[in-house]
Image (cartoon, helix red, strand yellow):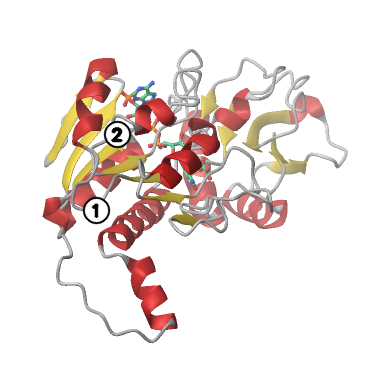
């Protein structure tokens, strides 16, 4: 029985080493090298080349190496096997660290103090708001959004969140559906986005949505923090909203095109923080351990967990 590593962008070497160690009973094949297609039972995918998983007659499951699975659906010849996504505490803590860090960066006006330090200016600002003055709206209350919402609330932010179906999270006011979003936006000072990229969410972060956010407020205007997917956002609308004051600032980990093109105005915009899609990296040790556990359980006859709903796209 073999496992196929079908990945682009990331170096496969550490993944292969981890899989070989965690599942010694399985041979590991790498796309691009010769392998017996009939022997493959599991494919581990990160942006696999379209069509590369077809013609595997004994494929039992496709494991995404990331929590997001939009990359899997980009393959028009995707086989029928169940798609399993990453749910792992390592990824969850990394993401919440990044979200909390950026929430605090905007709350505590880090960029202004960096500038002051560069210019050797000693000017303290006694008008700083505190976390409990700020209303955070978290779009997506799943594994990542739910944890981030709880941690933001633990720091003192007032947190509300939006999901497709109703949720109950202690300390977080949960809303759902189209009406829930309409109610959430006008009270939101800081919009944290941890949604998957699907047909329903593509382009959601656009001029019309930004215009509904609370204007003014304790941060001087609403701030956007997106670590979900670049396809959720319309970057020309973000830039226009920043320049017109509809948005006060933005922290972006994901982009319409990645790597972010060298000539994107986002790189140098004074109100924007850019990070290279690494708010929560998939750490091979942690992710392979979780996948190996699932494969072992599956081979004992147990059902796979965290299987993606193909209809919803996440
Ligand atoms: P989950 O599937 O656990 O959660 C997704 C959440 O989004 C759920 O609460 C879901 O609602 C909600 N949602 C989905 N579609 C809609 C919709 N149309 N309207 C309202 N709510 C919706 O995913 P995770 O939390 O694990 O991950 C979220 C995303 O984070 C991933 O899909 C990926 O794109 C991104 N990510 C980014 C990383 C990075 O490094 N930047 C790293 C890892 C993930 P409901 O619960 O009701 O279904
Ligand atoms: C993921 C990612 O989906 O790295 O896990 O973006």
Give how far across and how far down residue 275 sits, in percent: 52, 56
Q: Report whether 188 appears left or right of 121.
A: left
Q: State the image quarter where residue 209 is shown.
A: top left
Q: Residue furthest right?
A: 34
Q: Nearer the viewer, residue 305 or 303?
A: 305
Q: State the image quarter where residue 80 is shown.
A: top right
At horizontal 77% and vertical 23% (from top left) the residue drawn is 51
Q: Nearer the viewer, residue 250 or 22?
A: 250
Give how far across and how far down residue 218 sits, in percent: 18, 52
Badge 2 local density, few (<14 within 10 Å), some, or many (20+)? many
Q: Report whether 273 appears left or right of 116.
A: right
Per the rendering, the mark at residue 293 is none
Q: State the image quarter where residue 131 is shown.
A: bottom left
Q: Report whether 210 appears left or right of 67.
A: left
**Secondary structure beneath disc 2?**
loop
Could you tell me how far apart the alpha carbons at marks 1 and 2 are, in whole angstroms? 24 Å
Q: Where 204 falls versus 249 (above or below)? A: above
> Disc 1 designates what residue?
219
**Marks 1 and 2 in Cβ contact (< 8 Å):** no
> Disc 2 designates what residue?
141
Q: Where 190 falls versus 237 (above or below)? A: below
At horizontal 72% and vertical 43% (from top left) the residue drawn is 8
Between disc 1 and disc 2, the foreground one is: 1
Asked whether mark 2 and ligand 1 are closer than 8 Å, the reply comes as yes
Give how far across and how far down residue 67 sits, in percent: 48, 38
At horizontal 41% and vertical 74% (from top left) the residue drawn is 115
**Secondary structure beneath disc 1?**
loop
């Amino acid at each position: 029985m073999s496992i196929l590593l079908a990945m682009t962008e990331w170096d496969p070497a550490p993944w292969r080493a981890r899989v070989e160690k965690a599942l010694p009973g399985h041979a590991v094949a790498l796309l691009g090298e010769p392998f017996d297609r009939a022997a493959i039972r599991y494919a581990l995918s990160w942006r696999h080349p379209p069509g590369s998983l077809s013609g595997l007659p004994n494929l039992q499951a496709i494991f995404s190496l990331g929590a997001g699975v939009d990359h899997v659906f980009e393959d028009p010849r995707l086989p029928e096997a169940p798609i399993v996504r990453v749910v792992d505490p390592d990824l969850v803590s990394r993401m919440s660290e990044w979200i909390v860090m950026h929430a605090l960066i905007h709350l505590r006006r880090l960029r202004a103090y960096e500038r002051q330090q560069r210019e050797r200016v000693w000017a303290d600002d006694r008008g700083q708001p505190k976390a409990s003055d700020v209303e955070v709206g978290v779009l997506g209350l799943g594994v990542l959004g739910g944890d981030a919402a709880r941690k933001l609330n633990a720091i003192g932010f007032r947190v509300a969140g939006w999901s497709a179906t109703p949720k109950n999270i202690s300390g977080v006011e949960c809303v759902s559906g189209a009406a829930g979003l309409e109610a959430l936006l006008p009270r939101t000072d800081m919009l944290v986005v941890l949604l998957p990229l699907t047909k329903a969410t593509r382009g959601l972060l656009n001029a019309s949505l930004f215009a509904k956010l609370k204007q003014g407020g304790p941060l001087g205007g609403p701030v956007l923090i997106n670590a979900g997917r670049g396809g959720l956002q319309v970057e020309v609308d973000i830039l226009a909203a920043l320049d017109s004051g509809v948005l006060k600032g933005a922290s972006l980990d994901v982009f319409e095109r990645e790597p972010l093109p060298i000539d994107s105005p986002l790189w140098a915009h004074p109100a924007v923080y850019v990070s290279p899609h690494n708010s929560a990296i998939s750490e091979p040790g942690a992710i392979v351990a979780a996948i190996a556990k699932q494969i072992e359980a599956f081979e004992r006859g147990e059902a796979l967990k965290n299987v993606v709903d193909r209809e919803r796209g996440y």
